[in-house]
Image: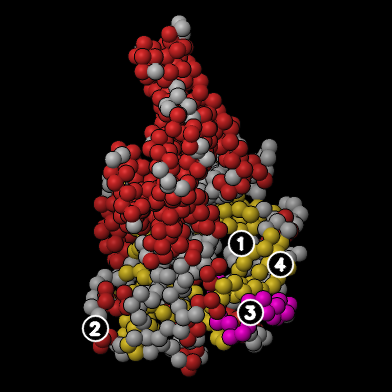
Amino acid sequence: MNDLRYSVRTLSRMRGIAAVAIATLAVGIAATTTMFSAAYAALLRPLPFADPDRLVLLFTTHTTPGEGLVLSRWSRPLIDTLVASITSYESIASFTPSLVSLSGGNGDPEQIDGEVVSPEYFATLRVAAVIGRTFLSAEDGATGDAPVAVLSDRLWRRRYGADPALVGRTVRINDVSLTVVGIMPEGFSGLSDKSEIWIPRAMAPRLVYAEYLTTPQRFIAIVARLKRGVTLEQANAELATASAAFPVPEGAVETRWGAVAQRIGEARVDPTLRRSVLLLLAAAACVLLITCANVAGLLLARGRMRRRELAVRMAIGSGRARIVRQLLIESLVLAAAAGACGTALAIRGVEVFARYAPAVLWTGRVTISPFSAPTLDARALFFALAVTFATSVLCGLAPALDTARTQLTHALKEDARTGGARRRVFRALVVTEIALAVLLLAAAGLLLDSFAGMQRLRQGFRSDGVLTFWVRPPTSKYRVTEGPAILERLLTSVEQVQGVESAAVNRCTPFTGCSRTILSFTDRPNDPRSAPVVGRHYVSADYFKTLGIPLLAGRTLTSRDRPGRPPVTVVSESAARRFWPGESPLGKRVWFGSTTGPFADPAQAVEIVGVVGDVKYEAVDWPNSTGRPEFYTSYLQFSFPDTMMIVKTRGAAASLVPAMRRAVASVDPALPIYDVLTLDDRIAGALSRPRFNAALVAGFAAAALLIAALGVYGMLSYSVSSRLREIGVRLALGAAPQRIVRFVVAEGLRLAVIGVAIGLFAALAAGRVTRSLVVDVSPSDPRILAAVTTVMLVVACLAAWLPARRASAVDPMVVLRQE
């Protein structure tokens, strides 16, 4: 306790140094704690279900030479085969996330997230309704025999005012009346993490997809609970045996098929998400290490000023261990104060991060949503405490060890003119700061350059004044074959709205990812093992006009391209160059897919009638996809009912949203529009993850650069102050002040060069991590590495110039008189 009180008094006498140290460390602790909270929420936080370690997702797998191992979902017939052949699970349930239209009751029609589930779903997750019940086994019978639904607490409160009498009444889903039989607990939103309604799978053919229970298409997810005592390895061995008897999908070529179980905690995290979050956490940790090195340098310099004081204490009986303990306690007090300030900053940082971190940062490519809002919970506070303790050791270790090596007689005789060993430690700390700053600058440069490249891909179309929204005519009301007719009526109604220049449909927009299929030709041999993958679009005649995509040859689609007329397609310029180099593709015939779907065999081949400019449709993190071949067919000749309406307006696009709702309601009052965004906003959302990653790492890099510059300045200031007599003698002997400036700046540059070299080597070694987060940029790009080197050396020169100027202004007579 005496040591603690003495440490507080000592630090109170060095308020300036203490304040700088506390502020610097607080920034590092806050950044690291905030990013730990985000990483824990995204990667480690257990799902809110009982005994989650026994919950697994089951996947079918197939392995091809080109794609490697691919995880897929299940069809209902395949699920029945699976359940009959495995015994490792207490229960097995199926679920399919699906958007549905809710109409009737209070409020306008709206699109909500739901899940189509088997009766075992809730029991498998071990969650029960708080009002009413969940689904019964008897409600998994014949199609349409179970017109019931279970609602989430959120929907029950938002739409129905938490009326307990709602149970037993009906709601209209996709224009079909369903009886509400239960309300789920607050906070439960299913495995998709966003569901507001659950529908028994027996109702799926009426509400979602007519062939849901019979199609061989694999789009149904499976969750299962392992029996007690059964390991994941045992379950997978059983799956491997069972999957050997599964039917091979028609059209599969040279592919190995199987099945695998993955724990939910593993399956829910997208690899890109994992890499993004870990990169941000590593960047924050680098900032913390730089702050620790900086504060250690401050304490080392302060230790030089206290050297005689500590020597006197040793002379009157204080042991070295006691002195070392005293210095470590002082650093612990500094770190504790910084930890308190850093935790307070982290509380705000977590709030800001949760608000501004784009949802796409957490979006995975599996069924389980990995998003959980980061919070500063007990684990994060424990982490902050651990970081604070580690920081105190890192900051106090160098001064304490330096003191432990001190010889008493030397310390009592020593003055400010000596201390070469301490300068070496100081230089090592500065080199560490510079190396870590260079590592962060290189990572930030890669991410920023990659993001700038993504921005440059916004070409080949116009996005200004374009409004987009989805419509999903329910299959319970409109058969798939009626899709083109209802979409044509919707387009006609939207085009009549005042302020609309043109309107079109497509199931995607640039940068959001579109359907893909394989391409076959009528005039050459087709090898299914190497069939090219192309983009597939079902568009209306004005699509190219609406987005300003230029026509390069032939014609675009017209309203005459409808059933009963020869099927036609328009191709992108990249498709024409790739598949028909040196010749015109006009008049060529192709077909899509393998054995099912529209235009899927030579008898349904489509004729190419036009060539249009290239547009990037794939997600921004898909490299080299600017020139992917794209094929456009008329939605009138085939289209799914659910699609996106794309509207070119004359004024502010967002101002026409109410008119769009009225236009759609005039065709079907129960049909809502949803996911309403301008095209600019939709593209900005697609770019949000790389933008966020780049901005945050750049912020960390800027902080690291500033702290490293302060480290160079502090080290050279310490060096100048400890060598004033030497500098005074040089000046007295005729050395020019400019030479002194060059001498001091050169010392700083030597350290900077060493730190830059180490940092560049570390950046190249870390290239495997950063490579997966950038597009069309190499981690060893000489432009970026040269820019990082230049910035660091310039900043080091500027930081060295100030103490160099002070050294050159020394009056040699004053210095020598002090001796």
| Residue kind at label 1, given as amino acid type | Phe
Whole-angstrom CA distance, mark 2 to mark 3, is 44 Å
Quadrant for the N terminus, please: bottom left
User: Which residue sits at x=29%, y=78%?
Assistant: 156
Depth check: give the residue in front, 779 or 18: 18
According to the picture, the residue beneath numbered tag 2 turns out to be 163
Which label lies toward us, 4 or 1? 4
Whole-angstrom CA distance, mark 4 to mark 3, is 32 Å
Which comes before the other along the chain, label 1 or label 3? Answer: 3
Give SS at disc 4. Answer: loop
Depth check: give the residue in front, 157 or 785: 785
In magenta segment, residue 271: no
| Residue kind at label 4, given as amino acid type | Ala
Which label lies toward us, 1 or 2? 2
Q: Mark yes or no: residue 426 visible.
A: no
According to the picture, the residue beneath numbered tag 1 turns out to be 599
Q: Is residue 205 above or below residue 706?
A: below
Whole-angstrom CA distance, mark 1 to mark 2, is 50 Å
- The answer to which image quadrant residue 759 occupies is top right
Whole-angstrom CA distance, mark 4 to mark 2, is 52 Å
- On residue 231, the disc is 3
Which comes before the other along the chain, label 4 or label 2? Answer: 2
Do the residues under discs 2 and 3 have CB atoms within 8 angstroms?
Answer: no
- Disc 2 crowd rating (10 Å Cα; few below 14, some 14-19, many 20+) is few
Which comes before the other along the chain, label 4 or label 1? Answer: 4
Query: In the rendering, at what x and y percent does residue 143 appear?
Result: 49, 86
**Boundaries of the magenta span:** 215-244
Which comes before the other along the chain, label 1 or label 2? Answer: 2
Which comes before the other along the chain, label 4 or label 3? Answer: 3
- On residue 252, the disc is 4
Depth check: give the residue in front, 678 or 816: 816
